[in-house]
Image: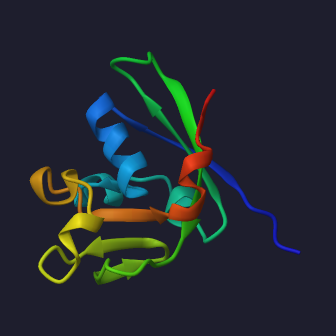
Amino acid sequence: MMTSRTFKVHTDNLGRLCACIDKAMYGVSRSALNGMPAELLRIEPGDMVFISERDVSKNALFGPFYVVDQRPGIIAKEKKGCWLNVDVQRSIASELAYWVEVESFAWCVLFDKTLIDRISVV
């Protein structure tokens, strides 16, 4: 039996966190992906992610979010494990967080949308 692992990532502001929750995804820039710890690059479906937010909550943890490897409406240009470089032109715009295109955080890990309503603050 495979055991899910737990990871912690962060975001600097509440708007990004709200978009993560609303769109069930977490994204980073290409340079952030290239500098990411190897363990986080090996994230797999079923793993849990908690997201900390700095500005408003002073690093409270939100989660758990459960990783999935794909979701309808989101098309990848390329993949590195569960991290996908989102193809903004071919993906359904309403499925994407604003920061994918606006802030060039196109490398994303996707979360299970059916469990998104079970988020807690730790």
- Pick the quarter of the image with the C terminus: top right
- 22, above or below 10, in the image: below
What residue is at 58 percent from the left and 42 percent from the top?
119
Display coloring: rainbow
Whole-percent x and y of residue 100? Answer: 21, 58
Relative depth, front residue between 51 and 79: 51
Whole-percent x and y of residue 35? Answer: 36, 53
Residue 78 horizontal side relative to residue 44, left or right: left
Residue 28 horizontal side relative to residue 82, left or right: left
Residue 49 horizontal side relative to residue 74, left or right: right
Task: Tell me if I can see residue 112 in this picture.
Answer: no
What residue is at 35 percent from the left and 39 percent from the top?
18
Whole-percent x and y of residue 114? Answer: 57, 63
Relative depth, front residue between 35 and 48: 48
Seen as rendered, the residue at the extreme right is 1
- 118, above or below 76, in the image: above
What residue is at 30 percent from the left and 53 percent from the top?
28
- 11, above or below 76, in the image: above
Task: Tell me if I can see residue 87 in this picture.
Answer: yes
Q: How many marks?
A: 0
Whole-percent x and y of residue 33? Answer: 34, 58
What residue is at 22 percent from the left and 78 percent from the top?
91
- Pick the quarter of the image with the N terminus: bottom right
